[in-house]
Image (spheres, helix red, strand yellow):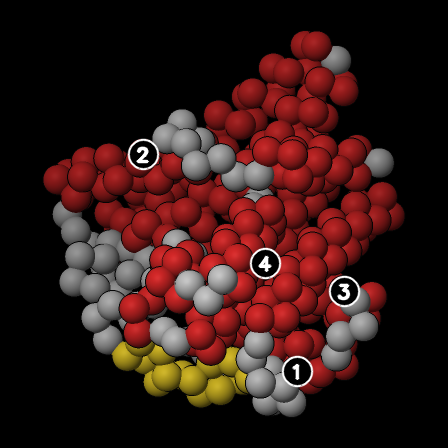
């Protein structure tokens, strides 16, 4: 039951505190550390793949070691203290409330017909060009972000908390969850196909793809049951996740985005304008309904149900083994 308590504490922390936008947040510290180490390794090892790999492994290893030591030391105050510390560390690695809050900002702006504020809100959670979006584009961008980041920002971290727990108990749960979050942060920091990071960031980008591979596919189970509970199109979530899984350059993103499209009965994807180029993605899902504001609210509910169900699945698996 220890993993159940860890995940419960993590979700309660997230519900109460969310993801505070402060400079001392551990994820922000990981990002800043990565940038400082980038300069060091570029000067000492060059700009290639090897330097980027060593930099990434240093950041991940350092983050994991710190968290492991903290959770081990917390055992001085008793087993429940260690469980609470591990729960806090897992809370740091997940961000379901942040996802929902950013989507709520879009909903509030659209309800007031304030497209400028809605574009600004979307610009906080996506790298596409918000100025090019009409209301339909804003809704589509928000839904795609929720579908993609329920994996990156929630279920993958919970999955690695479970893996870590099975390997190293309470300390392992905290250490593995933070290790995943560090790797994901490195992908967001280095994982660009531009001149600066074409080689240096390759390891971070590929590592993130590998780490998300299993959780992305397992998340589909949670999306299905979440859609059933919410009386959405659960069967279509499975159908379009499978049929459209390869219609995105990422090997993992469409397991979430296409599943959300199927569950909501909408079509997502298509040409997408970023700040410096347009990417011509295929469409995924089927336009049984035109994109409307209600679909963002439904997607928010689906994020909540997916998170709860996935956490319960992982806790039950840990109890069994």
Dot 2, how many residues are within 10 Å of its Cα: few (below 14), some (14-19), or many (20+)?
some
Q: Quadrant of residue 71?
A: top right
**Residue that badge 1 annotates:** 265
Specify the farthest residue to the top.
Answer: 76
Dot 4, how many residues are within 10 Å of its Cα: few (below 14), some (14-19), or many (20+)?
many
Q: Secondary structure at mark 4?
A: helix
Asked whether residue 51 is in view, the answer is yes
Spot occupied by residue 256 in the image (x, y as percentages of width and height): 59, 69
Spot occupied by residue 108 in the image (x, y as percentages of width and height): 53, 57
Dot 1, how many residues are within 10 Å of its Cα: few (below 14), some (14-19), or many (20+)?
many
Return the disc, 3 or 4, that comes first in the chain's sequence: 4
In the image, 160: left or right of 37? right
Return the disc, 2 or 4, that comes first in the chain's sequence: 2
Count of marks placed on residues = 4
Look at the numbered discs 1 and 3 and tell me whether their residues touch, using CB distance below 8 Å: no
**Residue that badge 3 annotates:** 226
Position of 81 relative to 55 (above/below): above
Estimate the spatial distance between the alpha carbons at disc 2 and disc 1, rounded to whole Å. Answer: 42 Å
Residue at image location 70% in from the left, 10% down from the top: 77
Return the disc, 2 or 1, that comes first in the chain's sequence: 2
Q: Nearer the viewer, residue 239 or 104?
A: 104
Position of 286 relative to 147 (above/below): below
**Residue that badge 2 annotates:** 33
Mark nearer the viewer, 2 or 3: 3
Q: Which mark is residue 150?
A: 4
Estimate the spatial distance between the alpha carbons at disc 3 and disc 4, rounded to whole Å. Answer: 13 Å
């Amino acid at each position: 039951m220890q993993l159940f308590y860890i995940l419960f504490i993590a979700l309660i922390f997230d519900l109460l505190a969310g993801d505070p936008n402060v400079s001392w947040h551990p994820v922000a510290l990981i990002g800043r550390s990565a940038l400082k180490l980038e300069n060091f390794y570029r000067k000492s090892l060059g700009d290639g793949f090897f330097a980027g790999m060593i930099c990434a492994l240093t950041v991940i290893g350092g983050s994991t070691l710190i968290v492991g030591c903290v959770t081990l030391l917390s055992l001085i105050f008793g087993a429940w203290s260690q469980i609470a510390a591990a729960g806090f560390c897992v809370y740091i690695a997940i961000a379901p409330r942040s996802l929902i809050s950013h989507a709520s900002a879009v909903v509030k702006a659209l309800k007031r017909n304030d497209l400028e504020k809605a574009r600004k809100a979307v610009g906080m959670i996506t790298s596409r060009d918000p100025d090019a979006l009409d209301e339909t584009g804003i809704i589509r961008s928000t839904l795609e972000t929720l579908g993609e980041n329920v994996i990156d920002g929630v279920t993958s971290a919970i999955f690695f908390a479970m893996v870590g727990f099975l390997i190293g108990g309470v300390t392992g749960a905290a250490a593995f969850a933070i290790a995943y979050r560090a790797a994901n942060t490195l992908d967001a920091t280095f994982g660009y196909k531009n001149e600066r990071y074409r080689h240096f960031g390759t390891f971070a980008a590929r590592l993130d793809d590998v780490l998300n591979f299993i959780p992305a596919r397992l998340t589909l189970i949670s999306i299905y049951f979440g859609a059933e509970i919410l009386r959405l199109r659960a069967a279509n979530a499975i159908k379009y996740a499978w049929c459209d899984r390869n219609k995105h350059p990422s090997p993992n993103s469409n397991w979430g985005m296409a599943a959300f499209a199927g569950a909501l009965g909408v079509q997502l994807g298509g040409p997408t304008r970023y700040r410096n180029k347009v990417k011509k993605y295929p469409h995924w899902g089927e336009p049984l309904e035109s994109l409307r504001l209600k679909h963002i609210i439904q997607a928010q509910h689906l994020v909540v149900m997916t998170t709860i169900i996935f956490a319960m699945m992982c806790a039950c698996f840990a109890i069994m083994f």
